[in-house]
Image (spheres, helix red, strand yellow):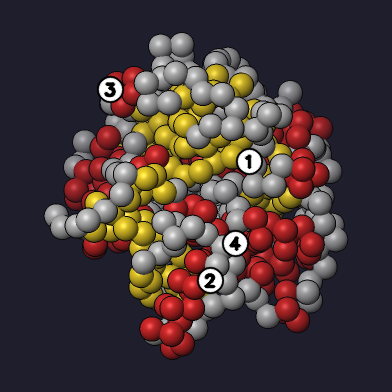
Amino acid sequence: MKHPVHHARVTPEKIAYQMAGSKESITFAELDARSNQGAHALRALGVQAGDHIAFLMENCLAFMEICWAAQRSGVVFTPISRYLQPEEAAYIVADCGAKVFITSQRYAEVGQKIRDIAGRDLKYLMIGARTEGFEDWSALSASRPEQPLAEQTAGATMLYSSGTTGRPKGILKRTQSTAIDALSPVFLKLLGEIAEVDEATVYLSPTPLYHSAPIGAAMVAAGLGATTIIMERFDEEAYLQAIETHKVTHTQVVPTMFVRLLKMPEDVRLRYDCSSLLCALHVAAPCPVDIKHRMIDWWGPILLEYYAGTEGNGVTATTTPQWLDHVGSVGRALVGSLRILDEEGTELPRGEVGNVYFDSGLKFAYHNDPEKTAEAYTKEGWSTLGDIGWLDEDGFLYLTDRKSYTIITGGVNVYPQETEDLMVSHPAVADVAVFGVPNEELGEEVKAVVRPVDFEATGPELEAELIAYCRAKLSVIKTPKSVDFRRELPRTATGKLIKRHLKAEYWPS
């Protein structure tokens, strides 16, 4: 059985989750008891199987307890990004149809604003303390039985997309089984079979839990009996220290974290012992080839890259040896197969660029948006995340970019990912976004916005240097016509670039 309830019986005193900073921890026995109490508390609040709840809080043990309480009581749960504005968070609370909203004392002020915007028709609770208009979740849960509900059934996540290309969309994923050990088939395949996560694993989670990959992996890791170390927030040196301290065997990061790690002073970066690492998964965006080579040189052939979306409609993966034979690939399909289609829906041959579709049999739906759901599927039942790419002769997928990010300049499609990957390898560049801006003659031209390592060193000379750097390795059509500099770029906490915020500044309304 792949569920914490099994490990609560077999290894009750083993740590299921531990916070990296505070060292606060919860054993499998405690997780089982507290998630049962949480399930009873939800029922006491009138939340039945199939109903929705939403919660917003920092990375903490209570976050995981609520997830498991919902998962074993048939409840659909929506964690919300703590980086959203109150209006954005309130939109999600209302849109998902939550009957209950839970927050923490740290976000009491934000929670109060959400309550004022979303209305008072649902029940509001807070962890650890009470504020006006909020009941005490901790007290309510602690007063409930530690035994399971009489009838347990699998819950489901309904996460919201990060909104990198528009307003966030609720994405409902249900497993085919109603048994409580029916966890994410994508993560069971990826972690259980490919990454070989088991009871001996120590898994380090450095990213915000409210996103699809972190919460999916943290739940499946516990289901497989691993101990998960959760960082309160990502910090490069603290991350390396956690690997050494806890003898971490598995971790999951995003490519921007690789960039930040590699740009640390070498004496600091190499100060920590990372030899316990057996597997480092990375996701969220294709990793620049140069960055990945440098990580392999540092950590060895332990990188496992995968491509998947919040939709959970499929997954590809590539081990380091496979990637070295197929440099730049995000791997082969682990469930079903991949299809590359043109704009008319005709399947393209190997090597040709088109829209990427999964033929996996795994289904999802965009909440309250049947039209958008229908647009994601072909008549054959294949589904897409909106990415562009191509397959090689061995079936390995190469992502070109998001369809919505394509720059059309002089009638030619330019995919900015290639330019971004090159520019971030320049020693003066900490982060970069490439997108199209208006051009009277060509329609669009290529623009780069750079977060430099040293902002005081920016100016026309660095701009010219970066353009020349690109021109030496890329065609002129892919080379930025101009470069602007910013102290920060708009990224989600898991590293996804929100280009629409940048593009809006350059396009007339």
Q: Is residue 460 above or below residue 374?
A: below
Residue 131's quadrant in the figure?
A: bottom left
Q: Distance between the residues labelled 3 and 2?
A: 44 Å
**Residue topped by disc 2:** 469
Q: How far apart are marks 2 and 1 (CA)?
A: 26 Å
**157 relative position to 317: left or right:** left
**Depth check: 148 or 164 in front?**
164
**Residue topped by disc 1:** 330
Q: Where is residue 475 in the image (x, y as percent from the top left)?
A: 49, 58
The amino acid type found where label 3 is placed reads Glu
Q: In this view, does 432 lie above or below 46?
A: below
Q: How far apart are marks 1 and 4 (CA)?
A: 18 Å
**347 relative position to 55: left or right:** right
**Residue topped by disc 4:** 257
The amino acid type found where label 1 is placed reads Val
**Residue topped by disc 3:** 371
Q: Is residue 204 visible?
A: yes
**Depth check: 369 or 440 in front?**
440
Dot 4 falls on a residue whose secondary structure is helix
Identify the mark nearer the N-term, 2 or 1.
Answer: 1
**Depth check: 238 or 317 in front?**
317
